[in-house]
């Protein structure tokens, strides 16, 4: 397990943007996350927490890479979503990939648009989080298979 964590940490340094696309995770990170046990937290959703709607990609089937990512944020009035609280956490280790995608994304109180997100082929789980102006946190799981 320790070697997986070390491999995972080294791979963080290797991520890069290619031709205006943002490489969200590396092949090494995908392998490390796939080898780790998948733990699913059992927590009750916070009442009136903000919601994250996945507008695109269409996750009903496999997607190609790069793909457009469009998220819509909704909060219960009078609260508003706090875009600065947005986080994207990859895989079993919940690797924070937020800073990899933000330079290439448009992030507002209404949502996030990332025109070209690149992921290696395979299955991916990205946990998305957003807080509202009263401190409630909403979480959404983006499960996607890339051809």
Image (spheres, rainbow, N blue to C red):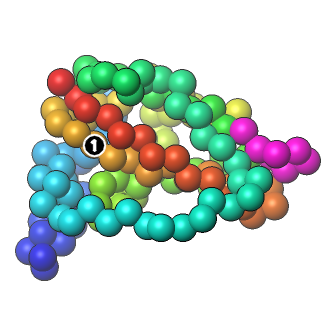
Quadrant that contains the C terminus: top left
* Magenta-drawn stretch contains 55: no
Q: Is residue 24 above or below residue 115?
A: below
Identity of the residue drawn at 88% across and 44% down: 77
- Dominant SS of magenta comes to loop
Of residues 139 and 107, the one drawn nearer to the viewer in this rendering = 139
The residue positioned farthest toward the right in the image shown: 78
The residue positioned farthest toward the bottom in the image shown: 2
Identity of the residue drawn at 34% across and 60% down: 95
The residue singled out by tag 1 in the image is: 124
* Magenta-drawn stretch contains 78: yes
Q: Is residue 147 above or below residue 97?
A: above
Instruction: Look at the image and tell me whether residue 50 can be seen.
Output: yes
Of residues 115 and 45, the one drawn nearer to the viewer in this rendering = 45
Residue 135 at x, y = what percent?
75, 63
In the figure, is residue 146 to the left or right of 128? left
Of residues 14 and 44, the one drawn nearer to the viewer in this rendering = 44
Residue 30 at x, y = what percent?
18, 49
Residue 67 placement: quadrant:
top left
Residue 80 at x, y = what percent?
80, 46
In the figure, is residue 101 to the left or right of 140? left
Q: What is the magenta range? A: 74-80
Q: Secondary structure at mark 1?
A: strand
Identity of the residue drawn at 47% across and 67% down: 42
Using a 10 Å C-alpha cutoff, classify the residue at mark 1 as few (fewer than 14 neighbours), some (14 to 19) or many (20 or more). Answer: some
Identity of the residue drawn at 21% across and 66% down: 37
């Amino acid at each position: 397990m320790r070697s997986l964590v070390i491999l995972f940490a080294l791979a963080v340094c290797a991520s890069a943007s290619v031709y205006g696309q943002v490489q969200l995770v590396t092949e090494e990170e995908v392998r490390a996350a796939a080898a780790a046990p998948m733990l699913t937290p059992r927590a009750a959703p916070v009442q009136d927490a903000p919601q994250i709607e996945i507008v695109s990609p269409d996750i009903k089937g496999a997607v190609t890479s790069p793909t457009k990512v469009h998220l819509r944020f909704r909060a219960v009035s009078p609260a508003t979503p706090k875009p600065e609280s947005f986080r994207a956490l990859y895989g079993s280790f919940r690797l924070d990939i937020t800073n990899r995608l933000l330079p290439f994304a448009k992030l507002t109180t209404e949502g996030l648009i990332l025109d070209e997100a690149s992921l290696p082929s395979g299955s991916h789980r990205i946990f998305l989080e957003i807080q509202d102006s009263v401190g409630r946190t909403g979480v959404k799981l983006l499960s996607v298979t890339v051809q």
